[in-house]
Image (cartoon, rainbow, N blue to C red):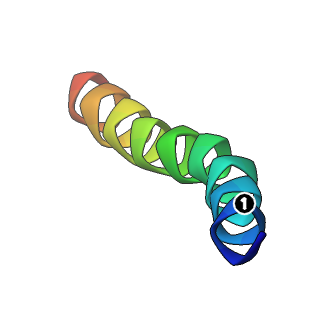
Amino acid sequence: MYFCIIDLEFVGVLPYFFIYKFGEFYFSFFGKWR
């Protein structure tokens, strides 16, 4: 049960982490071309 709760919290945060890192790369990439 404990690991299940940790897994659910990790899965809930993981997409936001990838969106943040992708957005960071996206804006830095287009910042060079402007």
Which residue is painted at 78% across and 69% down in the image? 1
Whole-percent x and y of residue 13? 67, 58
- Left or right of 3, for residue 22: left
Which residue is painted at 66% across and 48% down in the image? 11
Whole-percent x and y of residue 8? 75, 55
Residue 7: image quadrant is bottom right
Residue furthest out toward the left: 32
- Left or right of 30, for residue 9: right
Task: Note whether 9 is above or below 30 in the view shown.
Answer: below
Task: Note whether 20 is above or below 10 in the view shown.
Answer: above
- Left or right of 16, for residue 19: left
Q: Depth check: give the residue in front, 19 or 8.
A: 8
Could you tell me how many numbered marks the image carries? 1
Task: Note whether 20 is above or below 25 in the view shown.
Answer: below
Whole-percent x and y of residue 17? 54, 53
Residue 26: image quadrant is top left
Q: Depth check: give the residue in front, 24 or 2.
A: 2
Q: Which residue is mark 1?
A: 4
Which residue is painted at 25% across and 22% down in the image? 33
Task: Note whether 9 is above or below 18 in the view shown.
Answer: below
Quarter of the image for the C terminus: give it: top left
Q: Amino acid at mark 1?
A: Cys
Q: Residues within 10 Å of mark 1 (few under 14, many from 20)?
A: few
Q: Depth check: give the residue in front, 27 or 18.
A: 18
Whole-percent x and y of residue 15? 63, 40
Helix, strand or loop at mark 1: helix
- Left or right of 18, for residue 11: right
Which residue is painted at 71% across and 77% down in the image? 2
Residue furthest out toward the front: 1
Q: Depth check: give the residue in front, 25 or 17.
A: 17
